Amino acid sequence: MILSHAHRFAILVPWKTASSTLHARFEALNDSPYSRFYYFSPHLNRVTHQHIGCAEFSAYPESRLGYTTAAFVRNPYDRVYSGFIQVQRDLC
């Protein structure tokens, strides 16, 4: 998740939807206190990571600040195929 308190926005970065590009582009504006890697979230009461969806975001206190929230979407078939290729690459 990318948060900017100064500009009052939150960008959700679901898996395989340009999350690395978004983090690179908004690096200077990102005020997120949450790790991009695995960490325990007391708001969700479980281990999570940077790729959260809208339902999970609603459990975070930032969801109630009235910030503009955005997320990119991707063709589900392209997303599954891209994920499959990444998993195959990671296993080798």
Image (cartoon, rainbow, N blue to C red):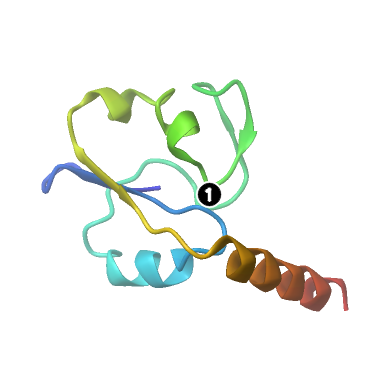
- Give the residue drawn at x 74%, y 76%: 85
Of helix, strand and loop, which one carries label 1?
Answer: loop
Q: Quadrant of residue 23?
A: bottom left
* Rendering coords of residue 60 (x, y %): 40, 26
- 38 relative to 24, above or below: above
- Please tell me which residue lies in front, 79 or 92: 79
Amino acid of disc 1: His
- 35 relative to 63, above or below: below
* Rendering coords of residue 3 (x, y %): 28, 46
* Rendering coords of residue 22 (x, y %): 36, 66
Q: Quadrant of the C terminus?
A: bottom right
In this figure, which residue is indicated by the disc labeled 1? 51
Q: Residues within 10 Å of mark 1 (few under 14, many from 20)?
A: some
User: Does 58 sit left or right of 3 as displayed?
Assistant: right
Q: Quadrant of residue 8?
A: top left
* Rendering coords of residue 46 (x, y %): 64, 26
- Give the residue drawn at x 50%, y 52%: 14
Q: Residue furthest right?
A: 92
- Give the residue drawn at x 55%, y 23%: 44
User: Does 65 sit left or right of 50 as displayed?
Assistant: left
- Please tell me which residue lies in front, 40 or 73: 73
- 23 relative to 11, above or below: below
- Give the residue drawn at x 60%, y 71%: 78
User: Does 50 sit left or right of 22 as displayed?
Assistant: right
